[in-house]
Amino acid sequence: MHRMLSAALISLSILATAEAASAAPLYFQGFETDTSGWIPDTTDGVMNGSITRVPSGGGTLGLTAFDGSYYAEVHNDTDGSGYTGWGDGGFSNLSGNGSTPTPYPGSAFSQSITVYINTATAAAAGTPAFWIDMSPDKLGPDGVSGCGAAACSDEHNFQLSYDGTSVAVTIDGSVTTALTISTSGWYTFQDTYAQGATPTSLVNTDMNIFNSSGTLLSSTAVLGNSDGGSLESSNLAGPGYIWLPEWQNGFSSDILGIDDVRADTLPVPEPGTLALFGTGLLGLAAVRRRRHDA
């Protein structure tokens, strides 16, 4: 399932970057002025998580912002996941309200978040240090309201495991490593969503990982049933959420750096080319639980 870029795809990505100029932003939070849209999770009533906007080079982590002059430090809501020893880092509904589905934008689209990865950070062995979950919004049979039922789900996750020198990224609980990150820096995690050939075709998703210069390092193609649900093309709405649902208590001193939480339309809907157009968008820009209500 996992495929790395070949020489042919690299050359095609140059064309994709040029054509991606017609893509349109659906949501963007770069933390240049505030932290609105990122919501510390209060579901479990623990609420010791938070988010802080900090200038480039400042804050606890002292990071150079991925984009612009500011980034955000997210603080772990320790034990807030509902599992002892695990917290979560909150979520974004990508300008939605968490209950009424955002409308389908009329073409394939992407959701992404940029996270600082310090490969030297220690974490408990044998289990991911934290997860990044993403899901689009879903429409019910009436074409307006949400699906509601678990059978109409499409939540995918990146799971990051640290060994003190590198980070192994796996997809949707797979035992196969999609990418090993050996250099510390900012990495963008992106899911794309595209309708299939018929209304009952499963939604197509490419789960992409980019480095700080926008180079595509890994792309994994999954369908709308890889999380145990079954999201058909006719049920695909617009951007849904990005969430940090599982976070080892104490990992990274309970602080992670994030930047550029976004959703964008993609100019060409063919599933096989979505990863390439995601690359262009980045150049232009410089499963355990379901949606939380804002």
Image: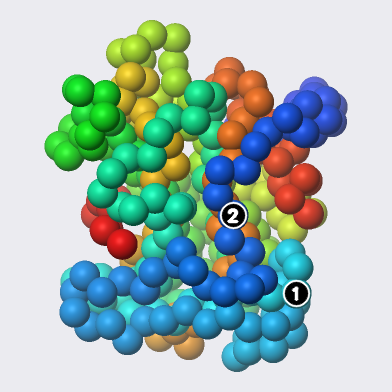
Looking at the rendering, in which quadrant would you find the C terminus? bottom left
Above or below 25: residue 213: below
Label at residue 226: none
Front in this rendered view, residue 177 or 230: 230
- The image shows residue 108 at horizontal and vertical percentages of 53, 27
Q: Which residue is mark 1?
A: 69
Considering every residue shown, the one lying at the far left of the view is 149
Q: Residue at x 40, y 55 (%)?
A: 93
- The image shows residue 153 at horizontal and vertical percentages of 27, 37
- The image shows residue 131 at horizontal and vertical percentages of 41, 61
Q: Which residue is mark 2?
A: 28
Q: Residue at x 52, y 54 (%)?
A: 169
Identify residue type, mark 2: Phe
In terms of image quadrants, where is residue 56? Answer: bottom right
Left or right, residue 205 beside residue 18: left
In terms of image quadrants, where is residue 126? Answer: bottom left
10 Å neighbourhood of mark 1: few (<14), some, or many (≥20)? some
- The image shows residue 76 at horizontal and vertical percentages of 39, 79
Left or right, residue 143 beside residue 240: left
10 Å neighbourhood of mark 2: few (<14), some, or many (≥20)? some
Separation of marks 1 and 2 at Cα, in angstroms = 15 Å
Secondary structure under the numbered disc 2 in the rendered image: strand
